[in-house]
Amino acid sequence: TMAMAAAGSVRAALQVSEVLETIVSCCLGPEGRHILCTKPTGEVLLSRDGGLLLKALHLEHPMARMMVACVSSHLRKTGDGAKTFIIFLCHLLRELRTITDKEKDSLFFKNIQTHGRHWKNCCQWKFISQALLTFQTQILDYVMDHYLSRHFLSIFSSSTGKRTLCRSSLEMLLEAFFCGRVGRNNHTFISQLMCDYFFNCVSCESGFEEVSELVDDCFVELKVGVTGLPVSDSRIIAGLVLHRDFSVYCPAGGDIRIVIVTETIQPLFSTSGSEFILNSEAQFQTSQFWITEKTKAIMKHLQSENVRLLLSSVKQPDLVIYYARVNGISVVECLSSEELSLIQRVTGIAPFVLPQASSQYKISNTALVKFCKPLILSSKSYAHLGLISTCSFIPHCIVLCGPVQGLVEQHEGALHGAFKMLRQLFKDLNLNYVTQASDQNCTSSTHVHKNSRESNQLPEIVNSSNQRTYQGTVVKNEDELAKTHSYSKVYSNLVVSSKELETYIPCSIPEVTPATTYQTDQTLRCLSPNKASIIDDHEPFIESNSASSTRENTRIEISSENAKVTETAEKRSLLPVRYKSLEMSASQSYCFSSIPAGCVLPVGGNFEILLHYYLLSYAKKCQQSEEAMVSIVIANALLGIPKTLYKSKKGNYCFPQIYTRAVHALQTNQPMVSNPAGLESVAGKYQLLTSVLQCLTNILTIDLVINIKRQPQEIYHQDSEEEL
Amino acid sequence: MSRLEAKRASLCKSEPLTSERVKATLSVLKGVVTSCYGPAGRLKLLHNGRGGSVRTTSQSAALLASLPVTQPVSKILTTSVQNHVSCFSDCGLFTAILCCNLVENIQRAGLTTTTAITLNKHLLSLCTEYLKSEICACRLPVDFGSARPLLCLARSLLTSKPACLLTREEVEHVAALILRAFLLSVPENAQDRITLGKSVIVPLRGQRVTDSTVLPGMLIEIPEVQLMRILPIKKSDSFKVALFCASLSGDLSETGEGTVVLSYGVSLENAVLDQLLHLGRQLVSDHVDLVICQKVIHPSLKQFLRTHGVIAVDRVGVALMEPLSKMTGTQPIGSLKSVSPSSYGSVKDLCTAKFGFKHFLHLIPNEATVCSLLLCNRNDTAWDELKLTCQTALHALQLTIKEPYVLLGGGCTETHLAAYIRHKTRDEPESILRGDGYTQTELRLISEAFCSALESLAGSLEHDGGEILTDRKYGHFWSVQADSASAVNWPDLLLRCGCGLYSSQEELGWSFLKGTHHPFVPQTCLPREASESASDLTLDCFTAKLSGLQVAVETANLILDLSYVIEDRN
């Protein structure tokens, strides 16, 4: 059955998001509260984690399910921001509704007479979604780079020129992060715990990037949850705590070596898929004898090689356990593959392969440990290893205690999210946008980041005049086409690396859904030869540039134009604005900048208010009504986040007061916050913004909701059609 | 391929604590746990209505495990208490009642959630800091040179579990046994790290409680028929023991994942039996006196061993393996061929014993850190309750080694703490508020809720309508029996406080626990002689109670902080 998206999908989406907003906004920010989820199994889960809550709701509405899917994919990337996602999306939809209600008959509709009202709506939304995309690819990065970047603070102290992680800044960042994720009474404690943990694990000053990656990847193995104890009993333990107990424990001192095995040490009669033929009883006894002797020999040999601990991913037979005990080798069995891979990653050893021949051999894949002993946490015993690390991660474990499992899980989730956030924060985030050449020289923006690390690849801007030449070659078709090719949307396809021009790194501009279905054959044909010629033409230019460049890592970008020419009379009339952009494209230049690693802003809606302020001022300057409109919509919606945040505050801390103060500070060029209470990652906020805009674009481009009886099928082959 | 099922949407409710149903469930739960509390607590009869076994209990561990709680908010409370009990065994009811009281009182106080839970946390840290400090007047240090505080602790635990149905003499007897069992499990020459031995509780139902006893070493129950075959045991200074964890039944295992093809006429059973007998011969030639197997021993092997004067005991089960291995110093053997001589252990003596209708093989070790507590009680349910109590008491004693303190019991710690908090919030509110932006009035309200939660917890020790008072010098707990309340002069009726530390001889001011409170400064710093003079104190486990207090407040905070309940109905 098909269901029309009554009154456009936006109205439905707004309704859905408003319901979700009421739920998530109650656990947003430092004043947020808990939500209790019960599972069908009878377990209870306490959460302030937006992503978890949305999943637990098992929403039925298709629009809601889509939103939840968008949130999940955002969370997988960044680990934070699910609640803000919903609130921002809701405010965006609200803003859109108000402007469309107002402009019912304005420029969007004038020329549509032949279509039904529904399709009319759909077209309208599609244009808005295109405008949103333009915003995302051009305006947002531009505003971030030109205006917001001057407000950025860094989590690194850069006094020595080398990046060193500033502890107090990290504390402020984490404190603010946990404020929104764990209960009011515990966030200081948990953020302190995480801070200690992080600094304990980092062996050298530059290792924090690697550590944040490793901890994010292996977080499940690095934490131990304990129920029945107060939260304040949570602590950090040096070494690695395996989630298993020893099968055999033999206290050992001195030189303790470990090996990893992934199969049973005792040889078996037959492996799967083979047959073992027994002809006599004596043969059976001999083979059993051989098996015993072989096992005994291997274990003895391990012992002679100073191996005192056997880590096994499988359950070892009684015989192996017995000989391990006889030889004083401790055994931990049934380790998960994740645990083993963590141990391998930390120690750099590979699993021990059983020798085929019985001759003497040297076991190379062993690692030294400082200690190996049982650890008892609330009457459960664990194997505790003092691994000696070969990477910049010094193994430590976090023991998380709580009265109920739900709370422990909440803290685990929050910590994991925090490591994800740090991982993102320690990376540069690229910004790409198009500027008018006359507007400003882009290089000025790079000065903002001069305190970032030396290796940071500063963008080099291609001279816009080089591009103008192909513009002409593409548009040398018939007159009509030349006029209508307003959609010559520009993609930069090639990024050519400096010296040899060998590698081509694709640039990360979000893919734009082709707006129209009509593409003339002529233009498509003329594209490919054109492309080749561009590269040829540019070679001398690049060489000269790299020769003059002093920096090793400088990237030079060449943009070839992938022009998509559209030919619809209808479109032309609908988007008068687009024409202008064509004319101006001649003077466009491409900027490649970045948000440097470690950029932060004071917490409490600062990012939103700043972006709001600059978007509005951008919109004022902007000649194109469409761009201005989208900027204003987004700017207004952004304010929804601080509004929700300060909802319950009164007096000096209520939202209007804060907003007025902030705007006044911006107008008079004063710092917005004198001594910030907490910090938040700019990269995280930026990614959230783009994720929400992408989700909104998705919502706006939907025209029909089709209810199907079966799960959407993945289509692998052509011949699977017959089923239907 | 996994089956796909349509998911039902979840049910979402806001502000669960305001709902009448939730309130009702919480108050029922509170009623159940409160009525069980203390030596005079009422018993609960648990049955399934279909003729299954019944259980009479007043212990949280047994009660909460079988109580069918489905309401999510109550579920948090009960799981939290159960988790606490699984870590500490003791103070489950204390935690549950305190948590219920706190939720109820703080809700009634009508402050915003954030204010309430922040201040609650501050008050909790005030309590824990005080209880851990040297000036704390409701904590006694434990000197292991004297058995008295440990005995008092064991006795208090036994008396607080009325479902054990013990008389006064029986309590004394069992308390002494528990202490002996505990002391036997402490190694004699302890190094820097003490590894406690094990006390195995051996059930002996249908006997008198006073028949219970503690024996060093282990008791393995043996059917009478089998015992006849073992007898007589030869006299010796030492007995060599072999302990098998592998099955000696002659079945084939671990042949791999592939197939084994047998030629006609080949009998693997014979081959394995040959192997077993070969093993038997090795054991005999190694002069092993006792063979113990976790699993089954093949009858032929058993017979073979018996004819060579070796005692064979099988099917001892996995639970006894660890203490057996520890006590005899053996390595459990997992091989049927070539047993390493280093795997054998020994026992000092071996004898048979009969307790009640049961026959046991008694293994007496050279160096005892393993002992058996033979526990008797009249009927099954009382035995279950007594066993649970003994385990709790043993655990509490072990915890006392880690933190050598005990808390005053009988409600005195609670009333004293309440008095201390009242005094602190009135006299030094700034030190508690720590500049968090909360007012003193808010603090006063929360502290009132917190203190009355503690006091009504102490008050739930009284189930017979008696009057409860507190003195205005120490802040201890005093109770007066119901019938005599109206007639005579108060101090004449009050003999000793709840914990038994103070008598009413001294000049003490009295006030009703439920009445209005006149804050006073409770005397801190317990004088050393005070604890030594009193002979019969009621004591509580320090570690368990401290953790219980923290868990109760944290759980109450969690419950108060709930703004939505999302119920997955799949």
Image (cartoon, rainbow, N blue to C red):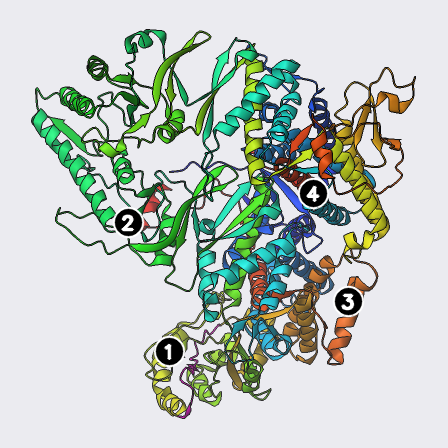
* Residue type for callout 3: Ile
* Residue type for callout 1: Cys
Q: Are marks 4 and 3 in contact (CB under 8 Å)?
A: no
Q: CA distance from mark 3 to mark 1?
A: 56 Å
Q: Which residue is mark 3?
A: A658
Whichever of callouts 3 and 1 sits on the residue coming sooner in the sequence is: 1
Residue A237 in the image, given as x and y percentages of width and height: 49, 52
Q: Identify the image quadrant of the N terminus of chain B.
A: top left
Q: Are marks 3 and 1 in contact (CB under 8 Å)?
A: no
Q: Which residue is mark 2?
A: A307
- Please tell me whether residue B238 belongs to the stretch shown in magenta: no
User: What stretch of residues is rendered in magenta?
Assistant: A548-566
Residue A352 in the image, given as x and y percentages of width and height: 25, 50
Q: Nearer the viewer, residue A660 or A671?
A: A671
Letter of the chain that mark 4 sits on in the rendering: B
Foreground tag (1 vs 2): 2
Q: Which residue is mark 1?
A: A526
Q: Are marks 1 and 4 in contact (CB under 8 Å)?
A: no
